[in-house]
Image (cartoon, rainbow, N blue to C red):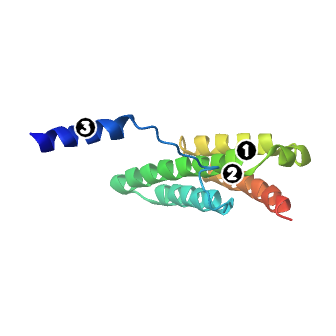
């Protein structure tokens, strides 16, 4: 009984003890690169191409599932760049940034709704524009 009481007491102390955590971003190492979003967008386009080239309904269903997962990852990687890497000074120097990110994340969302490779190519083009600005900020 004494052991059980000590365990309960210990658990109560642990459960109520304040915990302080901190992080400056989602990727504390400071390594950012639009390439992560681009690679996922290339997968989106490749899945669309494979979907369009196939007559196998099971394969096509898998291609759609993977395409949608990759499109979500595009959005995730873009938002990490937008919210964690880019700062107000970047926006002052590159006022088109907000529109670039808006258009790219919208294109990623649109790519989930279709198997039209032109939509995927538009997504890749949007990411390429973000990539140009990103590398300008690294100079």
Q: Residue at x 21, y 43 (%)?
A: 7
Q: Which mark is residue 81?
A: 2
Q: Give the alpha-carbon distance from disc 3 to disc 2, as whole Å.
A: 45 Å
Q: Position of residue 36 (x, y in %)?
A: 62, 60
Q: Is 75 left, or right, of 92 in this rendering? A: left
Which residue corresponds to mark 3? 9
Tell me if residue 45 comes above or below residue 7 in the rendering: below
Q: Nearer the viewer, residue 132 or 136?
A: 136
Seen as rendered, the residue at the extreme front is 2
Q: Relative to the observer, which residue lies in front, 21 or 115?
A: 21
Q: In this figure, what is the number of numbered marks?
A: 3
**10 Å neighbourhood of mark 3: few (<14), some, or many (≥20)?**
few
Q: Using the numbered discs, state the Cα–Cα distance from disc 1 to disc 3 in whole angstroms.
A: 51 Å
Seen from this angle, which residue lies furthest right? Answer: 93
User: Which quarter of the figure has residue 34?
Assistant: bottom right
Q: Mark 1 vs mark 2: which is more N-terminal?
A: 2
User: Along the polypeptide, which appears first: circle 3 or circle 2?
Assistant: 3
Judged from the image, the secondary structure of the residue bearing numbered disc 1 is helix
Are dots 3 and 2 in contact, CB under 8 Å?
no
């Amino acid at each position: 009984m004494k052991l059980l009481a000590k365990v309960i007491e210990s658990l109560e102390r642990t459960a109520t003890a304040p915990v302080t955590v901190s992080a400056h971003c989602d990727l504390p190492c400071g390594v950012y690169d639009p390439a992560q979003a681009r690679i996922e967008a290339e997968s989106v386009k490749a899945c669309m191409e494979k979907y369009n080239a196939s007559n196998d309904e099971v394969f096509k269903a898998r291609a759609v599932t993977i395409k949608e997962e990759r499109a979500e990852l595009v959005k995730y990687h873009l938002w990490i760049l937008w919210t964690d890497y880019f700062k107000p000074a970047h926006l002052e120097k590159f006022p088109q940034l907000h529109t670039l990110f808006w258009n790219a994340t919208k294109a990623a969302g649109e790519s989930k709704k279709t198997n039209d490779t032109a939509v995927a190519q538009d997504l890749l083009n949007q990411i390429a524009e973000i990539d140009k600005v990103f590398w300008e900020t690294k100079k």
